[in-house]
Structures are given as structure tokens and as C-alpha cells.
Amino acid sequence: MKDKVIEIKQGTVTSPNGFLAGAVEAGIKYKGRLDVGVLYSEEPCAAAAVFTANKVKAAPILVSMKNIARGKARAVVVNSGCANACTGERGLKDATEMAAVTASKLGIKPDQVLPASTGVIGTHLPMARFKAGIEKIELAKNGGHKLARAIMTTDTKPKEIAVRVTDGSAQYVISGIAKGSGMIHPDMATLLGFLATDARVEPDFLGKALKATVNESFNMITVDGDTSTNDMVSILANGAAGNTKINDKNGKVFQEALSHVCRFLARSIAADGEGAEKLIEVCIEGAKNASEAKKIAKTIAGSPLVKAAVHGNDPNWGRIVAALGRSGAAMIEERLEVYLQDEPVMRNGNPLPFEKDKLSRRMKTDIVKIRVCLNVAGGKATAWGCDLSQEYVTINSDYTT
């Protein structure tokens, strides 16, 4: 049987067998918005997660890091509207209680729950409202759609996907939801991402697969150069598909399918950057190695001058080369090739003639593509960002007022 990965129409994080979710309006964010949610597996799960590299870590991150250490979990509980970061001992107590209250609701142990929060830093979580919300949650098979909306902050739309995987004679589903719009420049993880699969996966391989996938997807997006205190991506694998256990030796198809899910979510986050109107895709080829290619791609995608030029449909490719030059990566100017919307604008270190007005019109699309060939070696990478608009400043200048 031929291996294949097919997206499930209207798929969400609860599309795999054995997963339920729910969300409610608890009044933590503001009236009329879902803001507390739960993802739950009816069966025990292998679990893995990656977390923010920011040295200031929110209380729920610290609790989740402790709970995931055994490589097992069965539930995720999340709130939006309050980050529970920089909240001291009280914050840690509240995050621990998040897990305990949820565990009681589900009939499982507190260390099987991964708490997560997103919202304003430096405010305490209103636990009375949180507890009341948890009691009201009704878990359902299609509850992933509600959960995807409950984790949104300045996002303009939910981000969710599920794929059905044919892996030899086995079939299983991998799914995910994510949130993120601002404070996006991840390192080790990004924003909030919750993944689920009904595949049977060896725990050590699951952790390695998640980390490798995150490094090629979520870690390759940038909106504003800021890494959050609350970034977290987790995956639960409950084995309900009954397949032969996936490991290092037979995990290629699983890895590819997981990458498909995470790249979709990562691109969706970049495209939904605060105030964004365009997705920027930066492809680097011919770098010294993959690590240097990643560095270049993220530097260009995150350059405020490049982002502003893309917003204004200005084919000012000199800003791309300037960002490349300050990335610190090895390069030889005389070998550089630069393409904007597939139009060659620089070759062998020399400018090429092009019709500025025509190229500007070609930039008036939802996706602007930048490709740079260094012709030094074989390193390559792709990063995603978004344009910089006046709306971004408006959103972030009165975020708490």
C-alpha cells in the first residue's frame, strides 16, 4: 500500500480516535469570548513537548515541564486572557491548581495534565472564574473547533488541521491547533501549539520527532522578533489506531506527516501576524550549512525594513541583501543571486534590470516570495514572516489600555 498524507476536511485536534475537547467562556478574557479549554485523551498517551527558551518562563510552563518529564500525559488545559507569567509563588500555585482542578474533572492524576496560558504578562489568573469554567466544560468529539477559538488572543482566525496517514498497511491521524499573532520569534517552541495522534509511537522517538519538526516549522517563523514567556508545543499519542509501534527505524512517514501539520500551522501563524496583510516566504539555497541557511532566512524574514517594503509593494531588494549581510553567515558577495517573486534582481553580486512598476504590481498578493542563492555550499532553509503595517503599531500601543 502506497504511503500518503491526506488533509481531512474541517479537521481539528480531536479528529484522531479517542480525543475529546471542550471550551467555555469563563470571563477571564472579556465577555463573549471562549477562554478556558481542555483537550483530553480517553486512553493513556505517550507525550512530548518543547518549551520557550526565554529565561523568564510563565508558571504553567514550569508545571508542564515537570509533568511531561515522564513522557506521559492525557490532557492539556489552557486559558487565554492571562499569561500567568511574572506572578511569583502565587502564579506557580495557581498553575499547579489548574492541573489539579482539571484532573479532578477528568478523573485522572494531576501530573497527567499539561497546563498552558496565554495573554497579558504580570497579572494573576482569576482562579474562581477558572474553576467555574472547568466545571462547565462539556467534552465532545468535535470540541477541537471550540478549543482552537478559546486559545486565540489577537489572532483573527483559528488555526487547525488534521491529516489521515497511510503508512504501509497502517492508518492513523495526526492533528493540531495553534495560536499566535504577536510576540512571535520562537526558539525551541512557539506560542501555543497542541498536537494529537492516534498512532502508537515509542516515547523517545516521539520527543525527537517533535523537536526536529518544530525546528523546521514553528522555529522558522517570525512576526516581531519577540520570544514569549509562554511558548509551548505539545503532542499526545494514544495508540488508538492499533498500528505497529512507530520508532526510529520505521518513523519516516510519521515524521513527514507531522512536518506537514506543523508547517501548515506555522505558516498560518505567520500569515496572521498582528496587522499583517501578506505572508513573506524566504527560501535560502547554497549556504555553508543548514544552520547558517536558517539564520539567514529568519534574519531576512524578521527585518523591519524588508517587512515594511513588502507592505508597501516596494521591490527594494537592497534591504534583503543588507539583512543577509548582517546575519553573520558566511557569504561571497560576487556569488549572490536574489529573486523577488521569482524575478531575478541580482546575480553574481551585480544588479539586474527589471521593470519596477511591474514587479511592484506582482507584489500585491497574499504571499511574497524571496529567494536567495549564496552558491557557497548546499545548506538550505525556509522561513516565514509577515509584512509590517500601521495596524501592528495600533494593536500593540494600546494592548492593555
Image: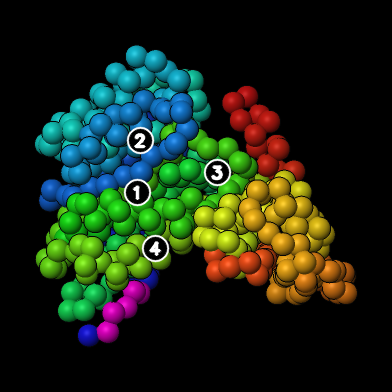
Per the model, the C-alpha gap separating discs 2 and 1 is: 10 Å
- Residue 90 position within the rendered picture, expressed as x and y whole percent measured from the top left: 35, 14
Residue at 30% across, 53% down: 208
Q: Is residue 289 above or below residue 347?
A: above
What is the count of numbered marks? 4
Q: Earlier in the sequence, mark 2 or mark 1?
A: 2
Look at the numbered discs 2 and 1 and tell me whether their residues touch, using CB distance below 8 Å: yes
Query: What amino acid is at disc 2?
Result: Ala
Per the model, the C-alpha gap separating discs 2 and 4 is: 23 Å
Q: Which mark is residue 194?
A: 1
Q: Quadrant of residue 172?
A: bottom left
Disc number lying in front (1 or 4): 4
Which type of secondary structure does the marked residue at label 3 adopt?
Answer: loop
Q: Main secondary structure of the magenta part?
A: strand
User: Which region shows up in magenta?
Assistant: 2-6
Disc number lying in front (1 or 3): 3
Which type of secondary structure does the marked residue at label 2 adopt?
Answer: strand
Please rate how many residues cluster around mark 2, counting C-alpha atoms within 10 Å: few if below 14, some from 14 to 19, many from 20: many
Q: Is residue 398 above or below residue 330?
A: above
Please rate how many residues cluster around mark 1, counting C-alpha atoms within 10 Å: few if below 14, some from 14 to 19, many from 20: many
Quadrant, the N terminus? bottom left
Q: Which mark is residue 259?
A: 4
